[in-house]
Image (tube, rainbow, N blue to C red):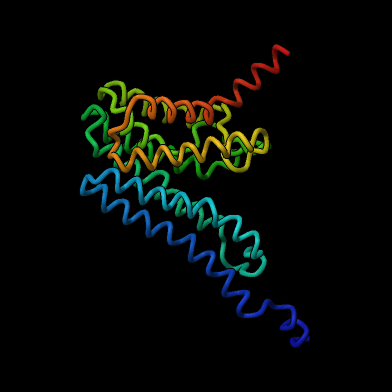
């Protein structure tokens, strides 16, 4: 009986390969630490570069895990929990520090909003309804790395930046749909094309330490509006059809 059960166990090489995917995901947390070190030094472009690497890890570890059947081969390790832990520090905690410490918000409001970002995002990550059936996010999906990027890109007056961050905190729990760039099937070809354009423009922006022209800023903002508002526009158009 034991021999039969042993024969059903994956080979050590397969188990090691599966576990290496968890190690790869965990490296996202290490990348977050490097990003935080740059943030403490106020090397903001370098911080976003590290967060960009973490974003790449987050984008490819899932498909690799599914390819290697990690959930079955390594059942004692939860990739979902690990992913949430790493996502929280890369999408929320490090960007929240940057938003608060950058001096772009009203001084009296900055620490309050920083606390609000962390608390509301933790609650959002725990919400089992965070994704709709069609894989859209419900509410602002705690993409504070993106919010911080646009804060540095636009460099609005402190009052406007403060109002923007406060609005995003509230929108975390407003049931509108935000596009998941990878998992939403509808218009995926267009979405992925725009994400590639966004990545190129973002890298260009970081290379120039956010000192880019108005055309680049408009393009980056237009892509953000597509991600946030495309579902609402499509639903509105269908209602009039």
Q: How many discs appear?
A: 0
Residue 175 lies, in percent from the top left, at 57, 27
Residue found 67% across the figure and 66% down from its top: 72
Residue 196 lies, in percent from the top left, at 51, 41
The answer to whether residue 144 shows anywhere in this view is: no
Is residue 236 left or right of 227 when viewed as pictured?
right
Residue found 41% across the figure and 48% down from its top: 52
Give the quadrant of the N terminus: bottom right
Q: Is residue 36 above or below residue 158?
A: below
Residue 84 lies, in percent from the top left, at 50, 51
Is residue 64 left or right of 171 when viewed as pictured?
right
Residue 161 lies, in percent from the top left, at 31, 26
Is residue 129 left or right of 153 when viewed as pictured?
right
* Picture quadrant of residue 95: top left
Residue found 73% across the figure and 13% down from its top: 241
Q: Is residue 105 above or below residue 12?
A: above
Residue found 45% across the figure and 39% down from its top: 143
Q: Is residue 71 above or below residue 217?
A: below
The answer to whether residue 7 shows anywhere in this view is: yes
């Amino acid at each position: 009986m034991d021999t039969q059960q042993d024969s059903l166990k994956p080979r050590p090489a397969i188990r090691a390969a599966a576990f290496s995917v968890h190690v790869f995901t965990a490296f996202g947390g290490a990348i977050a630490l490097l990003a935080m070190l740059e943030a403490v030094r106020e090397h903001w472009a370098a911080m976003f570069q590290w967060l960009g690497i973490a974003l790449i890890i987050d984008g490819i570890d899932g498909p690799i895990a599914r390819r290697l059947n990690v959930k079955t081969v390594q059942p004692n390790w939860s990739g979902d929990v690990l992913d949430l832990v790493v996502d929280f520090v890369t999408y929320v905690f490090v960007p929240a520090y940057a938003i608060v410490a950058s001096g772009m918000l009203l001084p009296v409001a900055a620490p309050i909003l920083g606390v609000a970002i962390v608390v509301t995002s933790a609650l959002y990550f725990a919400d089992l309804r965070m994704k709709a059936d069609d894989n859209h996010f419900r509410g602002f999906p705690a993409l504070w790395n993106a919010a911080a990027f646009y804060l540095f890109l636009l460099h609005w007056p402190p009052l406007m930046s403060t109002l923007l961050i406060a609005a995003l905190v509230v929108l975390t729990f407003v049931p509108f749909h935000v596009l998941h760039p990878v998992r939403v099937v509808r218009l995926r070809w267009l979405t992925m094309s725009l994400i590639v354009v966004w990545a190129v423009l973002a890298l260009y922006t970081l290379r120039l330490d956010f000192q880019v022209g108005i055309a680049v800023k408009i393009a980056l903002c237009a892509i953000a509006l597509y991600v946030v508002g495309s579902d609402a526009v499509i639903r509105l158009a269908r209602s009039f059809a």
